[in-house]
Image (tube, grey):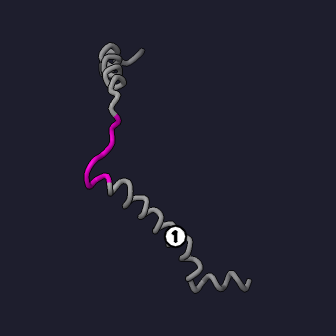
Amino acid sequence: MSETPFRPREKLIEKQKLFQSIKKSTHMKGRYDIITSVAIPLGFTVSSIVLIVSPFRSPYFSIFIYC
C-alpha cells in the first residue's frame, strides 16, 4: 500500500526547473544581513571563549591541580 503524494510529480518538476533557471544570486540585504553575518558568529565566539576560560577561574579548579 503506497501513499498518494501531496503534489503531482509533474508540478514538482515544473517548480524545480523554475527555481533552477534563476541565475541571480540570492542574499539578504539590509540590517538583517549584519545580524546573520556579524552578530551571530561574534556571539558564538564570545560564548566559546567564556566556556573555555571559565574552568580556569573556578575555585574548584585548584583542587584538580594539586591532586
Does residue 7 belong to the magenta stretch?
A: no
Does residue 30 belong to the magenta stretch?
A: yes
Q: Is residue 40 left or right of residue 65?
A: left
Residue 41 image-quadrant placement: bottom left
Disc 1 designates what residue?
49
Q: Secondary structure at mark 1?
A: helix
Find residue 39 and report its horizontal and vertical position in percent.
Answer: 37, 61
Give me the residue at 57% from left, 77% from top. Answer: 55
Position of the C terminus, as image quadrant, is bottom right
Q: Is residue 38 above or below residue 18?
A: below
Give me the residue at 66% from left, 85% from top. Answer: 63
Q: Hey, what amino acid is under mark 1?
A: Ile
Find residue 32 and report its horizontal and vertical position in percent.
Answer: 28, 53
Q: Residues within 10 Å of mark 1 (few under 14, many from 20)?
A: few
Q: What stretch of residues is rendered in magenta?
A: 25-33
Give me the residue at 38% from left, 54% from top. Answer: 37
Position of the N terminus, as image quadrant, is top left
